[in-house]
Image (cartoon, rainbow, N blue to C red):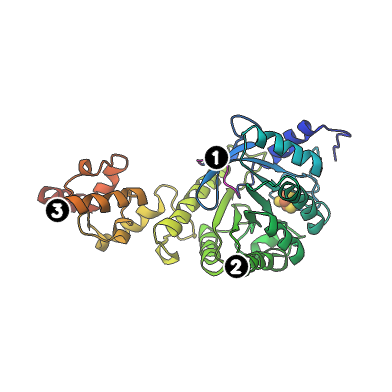
Amino acid sequence: MLVNPKPDTLQKLQLLSRDSQYDLACACGTNKLDRRTHGSNGKWIYPVSLPNGGSSILFKTLISNVCSSDCKYCPLRQDKDCPRCTLNCDETVRTFLDYYNNGEVFGLFFSSGMIGSADKTMEKLIAPAETLRKKHHFKGYIHLKILPGSSPAAIEKAISVSNAVSLNIETPGKEFLEKLSNKKDFLRDIVEPVKLISKLIKEGNRRVKQTTQFIVGAAGETDKHIVNYTAALYERIGLNRVYFSAYQDSDQQGNAGSQERLAREHRLYQVDFLFRKYGFTQSDIIYDRSGLLSIETDPKEVWAKNHPEFFPVSVNTAMRYRLLRVPGLGPVAVDRILERRKLAKISSFDDIGIERNSKKAGKYLDFGNRQQNKVFLFNF
Ligand code: SF4
């Protein structure tokens, strides 16, 4: 293992923020490409989408990239020969406050490799957050990663200083995690703590968000496995957000397998949006015979093509849930339609000012024009 005997704080941040880029549990960036890059104005400053739907600029870093675990997909696993270091509490707090007082960041996200044990690592993650809350009276956004296998006491303490917490579930089931790690026990180290986090947040009536992340394509799982598990996490445990991270082997970046996993990740995010914003359920998601989502066509349009009996949807009379099923119409466009039609009949896209995707949506909508209906029947 390479160890720089005395890296300064900036050298540590260079290394640790680079290594935190694949942790998407606070969704860095605003689109699938920049989620994996550093913010433009600094290497550890990121624009992020927050679990409650807002956005912010966060100071995001690993506290340490030392790790005693063995996750096969991770470039930081114990047997990898890479430079390692750990930020101490004082330098973490000082660095954050410098950026915060300059107005460059509004909150933070801390994660870490496993430094020996989960609880020992949690102490290092919680200490700077606690110092900021208690000593510096920081009231802004704090997101802490919870390590697999953390004790109830460590989880409770992390929740008490955070606005959001996340424990990465990684795989949709025990049999898949066993392919990736000999050290983590899926039920004991991941599922039970995820349930406990949810219980503590609910029982304490706390306004803390809970998120998690799947790694896509590392364990032979299908999209169907991930989607079904995601639905269960929303329905049974009440998670606020689920994130997906395509497995990126550093030796294979850019190759076909890696591109395919990125495409799968994109489709999984679309399904996640269908669940959270469009009223879709598990049974609405359509897969190929191997349990994968279509790469060519987005999951909402796949559903529409398989349900011709549902269309055309009347733009002037259909209820909101029916309009939300129309490919090319998002919640904002649907709300605009609902508002506009209170005032007057809608006879074309010009009436509602929707240009983007209007061609796609037009195939599924009925404006009540005879001519348009003929075209619809012909095209469908
Ligand atoms: S515990 Fe985290 S840092 Fe360590 S090998 Fe697993 S994923 Fe990587």
Does 32 sit above or below residue 288? above
Q: Crowding at label 3, few (<14), some or many (≥20) Cα neighbours within 10 Å?
A: some
Residue type at mark 2 is: Lys
Task: Using the numbered discs, state the Cα–Cα distance from disc 1 to disc 2 in whole angstroms.
Answer: 29 Å
Q: Amino acid at mark 3?
A: Gly
Q: Which mark is residue 202?
A: 2
Upstream in sequence: badge 2 or badge 3: 2
Quadrant of the rendered structure where residue 13 is? top right
Q: In this image, 288 relative to 58: left or right?
A: left
Residue annotated with mark 3 = 368
Towards the viewer: 113 or 9: 9
Taking the image as shown, residue 219 lies to the left or right of residue 122, namely: left
From mark 1 to mark 3, how far is it between C-alphas? 41 Å
From the top left corner, tell me how far across and down residue 312 is, in percent.
Answer: 22, 57
The residue that disc 1 covers is 29
The residue stretch that appears in magenta: 26-31
Asked if the magenta segment contains residue 227, the reply would be no
Which amino acid type is shown beneath numbered disc 1? Gly
The answer to which of marks 1 and 2 sits earlier in the sequence is: 1
Image height of 128 relative to 200, above or below? above
In the foreground, 76 or 150: 150
Q: Magenta-highlighted stretch: main secondary structure?
A: loop
Q: Is residue 71 visible?
A: no
Q: Secondary structure at mark 3?
A: loop
